[in-house]
Image: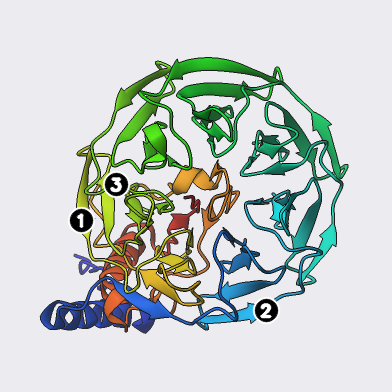
Amino acid sequence: MAAMRTQPPPRFPPLLVACVIAGAASLSSAVASGAGLWTPAASMSESRFHHTATSLADGRVLVVGGSVTLNAEVYDPQANTFTPTGPMSIQRAYFAAVRLNDGRVLITGGESKSAIVATAEIYDPKTNAFTPAATMGYTRAVHTATLLKDGRVLIAGGIGNGLSTAELYDPQANAFTPTGMMYPVGYHSATLLKDGKVLVAGGCDLNNGCFPFAAVYDPGTGMFAMVGMLSQGLGTHTATLLPDGAVLIAGGFGAKATPQASTELFDPMAAVWKPGPMMSISRNGHIAAGLVDGRVLVAGGYDNEPSLPPLSSAELYDPATNSFTLTDPMTTKRRFHAAALLMNGQVLVAGGSDGSAVLASAELYAPPPWSSSASSSVGAGGGASSSAGSSGAGGGGSTGPATGCGCEMVGAASPAGGWMGLAVGLLCLRRRRRAGGPSRPWTSSRLAW
């Protein structure tokens, strides 16, 4: 009788084993020392607020503009460094930025030296430089730019002479063309839905305050259709696409231009709005970033007028329980900052104001362990959600696989990376056992305030 052949035990690359060990060790150290989930990152080359942060296809982050600068820089998570790029043609704040399908980043409009502009330019990571793009048909600031599934970009609303207009940018033709009319608004949000349509919600103008209106843009017809109403007029809020296709609206200006703690949820299947849970505190000038597991990080901002006191507090929205829970606060109080989700699942937060000075500092947030129901392709608006004047309007533009599945991507040797190092290491080991090869979590970004 032939001897029975036994299956040898699986062997895993030392990197993955080290990732689990380092993650567990650093996590234990972090818990024992009381260290939080936020850790300082390298500082930017200059102070910024009212800027954008857009994830690039290679995992780096492009940080652009701000209220007093035309300069830009790129954050490299592997090296933890910011490196200046070539400058934009003009200073810009309250503009919109969105990554195109070819990896370039489109910059449109904004305020430049107290003037609202219609010009646009494109950053090319291959040349590390900006070049002029076609000019929009209207001047716009605090508008939105949303990447559509066919690669075009929907530019909607904004303060300027195009308040009730929208136009489409075609990267192939380098041209802007008019599309359907919308209600007159700036400071609104625009979110790409799973069916390829775009939800435009809320917004304000300079004369009539904020509106509760909402509309859906259909690229097939080139028209906007009204779709229910928010519970109140709202502007400068954040909008985040959730794993089930719903959209979370959080904070922003409400009645009498006061920051709000309320949230609302849009159900695209039923085309209805319903109240969401309350945040722990009122927020405006905050960021919202969709995490890899489908939860949403909301951080910073300010909670009352007219002093605009900046906040360091942060909280997580869990779609599974429809609730917010506090997470560790940022290391620095910030309002009007920018954020981007990194390929390793961490969130980069950069710049803003602490109430007394504009900041050049940055920090990283490492989420608590992923839940068993983690979704691997969810980000803030799937990389296609923007808020007018946001800290990364449309930043991201796509989802895709990360470039690695090891400690060097997660930073497991740091306290903040402990959770992620342990989680990613165990996930990779589990997937290797099942599939016989490495697996890479998907990420996208989308950040707004």
Instruction: Provide the secondary structure element on which disc 2 rests.
Output: strand
Residue 166 coordinates in the image, percent (x, y): 71, 30
Q: Which residue is pictured at 17% across the width and 83% down the height?
A: 29
Q: Are marks 2 and 1 in contact (CB under 8 Å)?
A: no
- The quadrant of the picture occupied by the N terminus is bottom left
Q: Which residue is pictured at 57% across the width and 43% down the height?
A: 388
Residue 176 appears in the figure = yes
Which mark is first along the chain, 3 or 2?
2
Which mark is first along the chain, 1 or 3?
3
The residue beneath circle 1 is: 326
User: Which of the two residues, 286 or 437, is positioned nearer the viewer here?
Assistant: 286
Q: Which residue is pictured at 52% across the width and 83% down the height?
A: 79
**Position above or below: 71 against 430:** below
How far apart marks 2 and 1 lie (CA) works out to: 35 Å
Q: Which residue is pictured at 70% across the width and 21% down the height?
A: 181
Task: Identify the amino acid type marked 2.
Answer: Pro
